């Protein structure tokens, strides 16, 4: 890293930018507006899922953009809503395992270091002892495959009861017991799940790979701008710092209007909190 070593880095979720612009332009805009990296989306849409089938040439192009424009260092793998590791349907479960393998291979080929896994055993069907057992079994296999490609997997805390806190994610981290599986919490979801956010964050000390910074209100989990919700970002930033976390990703969605103004507002809001936390000697 050139210049002064940063005490933290702040990335941008790909969906904070209009979907119709190209990936290189997204990276250029993110860099221009002060972000340190971008988190790629592989979601339930056919367009995003097709990325897993990219040729070697296209993967090299992404690696080149990551090296020369702005690092693309993580994937938000929300495709797993459609293809969860714990599905009771053998065909869906097989597709989920295959997609997980494809994502690990894609990350390896493009130089991406982290895959954020959706913390669901299932999404569109009821959670049962069977789906939880399948989830844990396939998660263990995913961690072994990730280890063979030097890719980190991070469980996201979600909006459902199955894994809406760091503490719940840590149960699976402890069971799998691999250095390639950790927690990649969503602060907004945690804030809607517990009144003691600090203790929950600290329960993952030593195992939190990164953190999504997202705004929420009780019962509302998406599409809020920073400052519109109930999340106490300042106190959470202190807890993350105490837990040894220094990688953060701004998670919000482009909802129309001036995308660049939205980037500036988000960057200013979060940098103000993180700078005070990491650079103020009183903290």
Image (cartoon, rainbow, N blue to C red):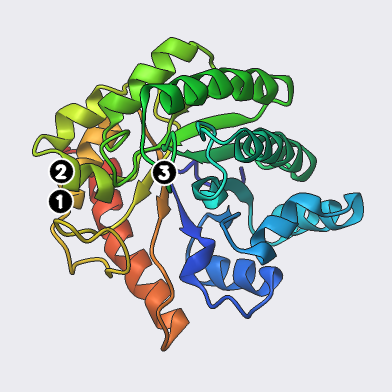
- Residue at which label 2 appears: 235
Which of the 4 image quadrants contains residue 47?
bottom right
> Residue 125 has which mark?
3
Q: How many marks?
A: 3
217 relative position to 48: left or right: left
- Residue at which label 1 appears: 232
2 relative position to 110: left or right: left
Badge 2 crowding class, 10 Å Cα cut-off, few under 14, some 14 to 19, many 20 or more, is some
Q: CA distance from mark 2 to mark 1?
A: 6 Å
Which of the 4 image quadrants contains residue 204?
top left
Seen at 80% across and 52% down, the residue is 53
Seen at 69% across and 35% down, the residue is 104
Q: CA distance from mark 1 to mark 3?
A: 33 Å
Q: Nearer the viewer, residue 81 or 93?
A: 93
Badge 1 crowding class, 10 Å Cα cut-off, few under 14, some 14 to 19, many 20 or more, is some
Q: Report the quarter where the C terminus lies.
A: top left
The local secondary structure at tag 1 comes to: loop
Q: Nearer the viewer, residue 88 or 114?
A: 88
Q: Position of residue 242 (x, y in %)?
A: 25, 28
193 relative position to 63: left or right: left
Q: Position of residue 70 (x, y in %)?
A: 64, 58
Dot 3 or dot 2, earlier in sequence: 3
Instruction: Classify 220 as above or below 52.
Output: below
């Amino acid at each position: 890293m050139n210049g002064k070593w940063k005490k933290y880095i702040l990335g941008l979720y790909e969906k904070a930018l209009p979907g119709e612009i190209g990936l290189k332009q997204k990276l250029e805009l993110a860099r221009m507006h002060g972000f340190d990296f971008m988190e790629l989306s592989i979601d339930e849409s056919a367009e995003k899922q097709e990325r897993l089938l990219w040729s070697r040439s296209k993967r090299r192009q992404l690696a080149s953009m990551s090296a020369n424009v702005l690092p693309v260092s993580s994937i938000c793998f929300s495709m797993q809503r459609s293809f969860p590791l714990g599905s009771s349907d053998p065909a869906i479960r097989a597709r989920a395992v295959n997609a997980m393998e494809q994502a690990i291979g894609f990350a390896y080929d493009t130089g991406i270091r982290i895959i954020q896994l959706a913390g669901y055993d299932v999404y569109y069907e009821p959670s049962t002892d069977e789906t939880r057992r399948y989830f844990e079994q396939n998660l263990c296999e995913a961690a072994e495959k990730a280890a063979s490609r030097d890719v980190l997997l991070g469980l996201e805390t979600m909006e459902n009861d199955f894994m809406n806190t760091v503490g719940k994610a840590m149960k699976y981290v402890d069971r799998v017991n691999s250095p390639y599986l950790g927690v990649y919490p969503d602060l907004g979801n945690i804030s809607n799940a517990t009144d003691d956010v600090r203790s929950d964050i600290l329960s993952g000390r030593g195992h939190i790979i990164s953190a999504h910074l997202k705004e929420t209100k009780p019962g509302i989990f998406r599409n809020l701008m920073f400052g519109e919700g109930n999340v106490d970002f300042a106190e959470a930033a202190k807890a993350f710092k105490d837990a040894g976390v220094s990688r953060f990703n701004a998670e919000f969605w482009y909802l129309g209007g001036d995308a660049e103004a939205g980037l500036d507002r988000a960057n200013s809001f979060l940098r103000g909190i993180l700078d005070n936390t990491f650079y103020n000697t009183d903290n």
